[in-house]
Image (cartoon, helix red, strand yellow):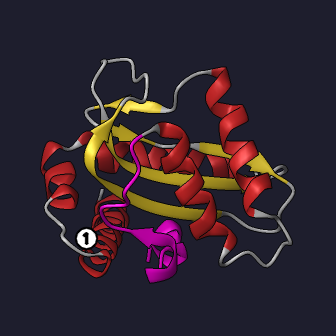
Amino acid sequence: MHPLAELLNLENTACHLPATSRKRALQGAAELISGQNHDGLTEDELFDGLMARERLGSTGLGEGVAIPHCRLQCSKIKVALVSLPTPIDYEASDGQGVDLLFVLVVPVDESQAHLDALASLSEVFASQANRQQLRSCSDRESLLASMQTLLNQQVTHSKSA
């Protein structure tokens, strides 16, 4: 199983989160992550870390996708998967709004894990079919299952290559 797929669950997945701005979407993601936080990071610390990274430059990849990420003092990677009912302005390089977010909070000393996670997510989101599959989900159960399947297909393809 893909390491990111193992970190996803219903508690850190939100389908059609009612966010109308990047700030609100990141607040929602910080809330999802803080609910499963065993490192003592508060929702505010998670949000502040994500916003600090966004101030360096948008994490919007284009094609309606963003991978907000930051590095904080924590013991393991934390994630959240969020879809939005309508795209929001995210200052993505292609100018398109964002409606799919995969949020990563990575331990400060996990540089390679951080890069590996970003590469895996970029590969999943590069496919129009994958993005459409995720956008077609109407509840968090189907969103979670779809993302886990897409991540796990990566593992299968890389083993057969």
When the figure is inspected, residue 152 is found, relative to residue 87, above or below; the finding is below
Residue 51 location, quadrant: top right
Q: What segment is highlighted magenta in the picture?
A: 1-20
Residue 125 location, quadrant: top left
Q: Quarter holding the C terminus?
A: bottom left
Residue 142 location, quadrant: bottom left
Q: Nearer the viewer, residue 44 or 50?
A: 44
Does 114 sit left or right of 21 as displayed? right
Does 82 sit left or right of 139 as displayed? right
Q: Nearer the viewer, residue 85 or 113?
A: 85
Does 2 sit left or right of 52 as displayed? left
| Residue 135 percent across, percent down from the top left | 19, 56
Q: Give yes or no for residue 149 being in the magenta stretch.
A: no
| Residue 1 percent across, percent down from the top left | 43, 77
Q: Give yes or no for residue 9 being in the magenta stretch.
A: yes
Residue at 42 percent across and 29 percent down: it is: 90
Residue at 79 percent across and 79 percent down: it is: 38
| Residue 22 percent across, percent down from the top left | 48, 38
Three-letter residue code for mark 1: Ser
Determine if residue 111 is in view.
no
Determine if residue 27 is in view.
yes
Residue at 28 percent across and 40 percent down: it is: 87
Q: Nearer the viewer, residue 54 or 114?
A: 54
Residue at 32 percent across and 75 percent down: it is: 140
Which residue position is annotated with label 1? 146
Q: Secondary structure at mark 1?
A: helix
When the figure is inspected, residue 118 is found, relative to residue 15, above or below; the finding is above
